[in-house]
Image (cartoon, grey):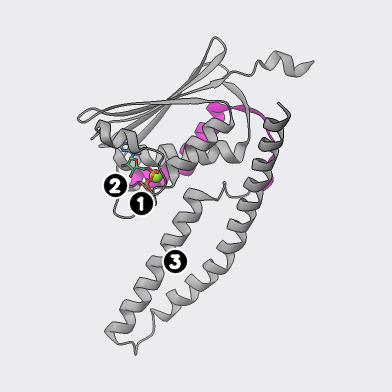
């Protein structure tokens, strides 16, 4: 048990360090991006020079994406302690932060919350988990993503489903492997981190996918009985 506790604490410290490094790297990248953007407005650029600037912007955006998929937590969640989280509220926050992304993809995201789905965890990590899963669902969906969350006995159940093209077994088996991506601009890091977060919080995951009807990610976490926390 001691070993397990030490390991968890270590992971916590590593996670926080990664989050602050990501944050610190993003600031200079933002200013570099701004200057390159300014240069693209210059009138005496050759077409080759314009191409270089475009490539620079694309590569900066790619680096930024790797940081979001792999390291970064939410916007201002650099130091977060573990606490009692309402998964319905957490999922709603993630859905709100992805609303323009969903609109851009012409996907309708709905969310059903029943009861008090409370677990013990870390907001930053939970946000990162939801954002990665919901983003993937939006990217794969034809037109609909649905999230449903409810407590069941001593568990919290979470379903994230999308219509559209699902996966075949060979694809499912590769989920969570680093750099496995079928997308042109994918990083293949989102699910790896997400599955790690699920493990950290004592959760389990399962995927049900069908080539024509879409995909459902099912998660379960130990329910945190809120009564006990008032003692
Ligand atoms: P990325 O999104 O950058 O490709 P991820 O680790 O988030 O990386 O996902 C890895 C791969 O898993 C995706 O490229 C895709 O092939 C597959 N995948 C994940 N979620 C879904 C989903 N909801 N429907 C279909 N395929 C999915
Ligand atoms: Mg992804």
Q: Secondary structure at mark 2?
A: loop
Magenta portion: prevailing SS class: helix
Disc 3 crowd, CA 10 A, few/some/many (<14, 14-19, 20+): some
Mark 2: C-beta under 8 Å from nearest atom of ligand 1: yes
Residue 218 location, x and y as percent?
A: 41, 24
Q: Within the image, what quadrant is residue 177 found in?
A: top left
Report the side of 100 relative to 73 (left or right): left
Q: Within the image, what quadrant is residue 121 found in?
A: top right
Disc 2 or 3, which lies upstream in sequence? 3
Q: How many marks?
A: 3
**Residue with the mark numbered 3:** 60
The quarter of the rendering in which ligand 2 is drawn is top left
Residue 201 location, x and y as percent?
A: 58, 29
- Check residue 186 in the rendering and tell me which mark sits there, or answer none: 1
Residue 99 location, x and y as percent?
A: 42, 42
Residues under numbered marks 1 and 3 in contact, where contact means CB atoms less than 8 Å apart? no
**Residue with the mark numbered 2:** 182
Tell me the distance, in whole angstroms, between the alpha carbons under discs 2 and 3. 21 Å
Q: Is residue 98 above or below residue 186?
A: above
Mark 1: C-beta under 8 Å from nearest atom of ligand 1: yes
Q: Quadrant of the N terminus?
A: top right
Tell me the distance, in whole angstroms, between the alpha carbons under discs 1 and 2. 7 Å
Report the side of 38 relative to 108 (left or right): right
Residues under numbered marks 1 and 2 in contact, where contact means CB atoms less than 8 Å apart? yes
Q: Nearer the viewer, mark 2 or mark 3?
A: 2
Report the residue at 45% width, 41% height from top: 192
User: What segment carries the magenta color?
Assistant: 78-103
């Amino acid at each position: 048990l001691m070993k397990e506790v030490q390991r968890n604490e270590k992971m916590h410290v590593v996670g926080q360090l990664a989050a602050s490094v990501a944050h610190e790297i993003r600031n200079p990248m933002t200013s570099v991006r701004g200057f390159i953007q300014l240069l693209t407005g210059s009138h005496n650029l050759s077409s080759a020079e314009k191409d270089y600037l475009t490539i620079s912007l694309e590569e900066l955006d790619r680096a930024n994406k790797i940081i979001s998929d792999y390291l970064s937590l939410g916007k201002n969640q650099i130091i977060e302690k573990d606490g009692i989280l309402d998964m319905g509220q957490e999922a709603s926050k993630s859905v709100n932060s992805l609303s323009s992304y969903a609109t851009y993809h012409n996907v309708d995201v709905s969310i059903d919350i029943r009861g008090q789905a409370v677990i013990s965890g870390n907001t930053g990590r939970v946000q990162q988990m939801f954002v990665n899963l919901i983003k993937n669902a939006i990217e794969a969906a034809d037109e609909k993503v649905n999230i449903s969350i409810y407590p069941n006995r001593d568990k919290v159940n979470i379903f994230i489903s999308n219509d559209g093209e699902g996966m075949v077994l060979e694809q499912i088996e590769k989920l969570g492997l680093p750099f496995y991506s079928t997308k042109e601009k994918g990083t293949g890091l989102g699910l790896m981190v997400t599955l790690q977060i699920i493990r950290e919080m004592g959760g389990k995951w399962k995927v049900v996918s069908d080539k024509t009807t879409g995909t459902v990610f099912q998660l379960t976490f130990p329910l945190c009985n809120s009564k006990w926390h008032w003692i």
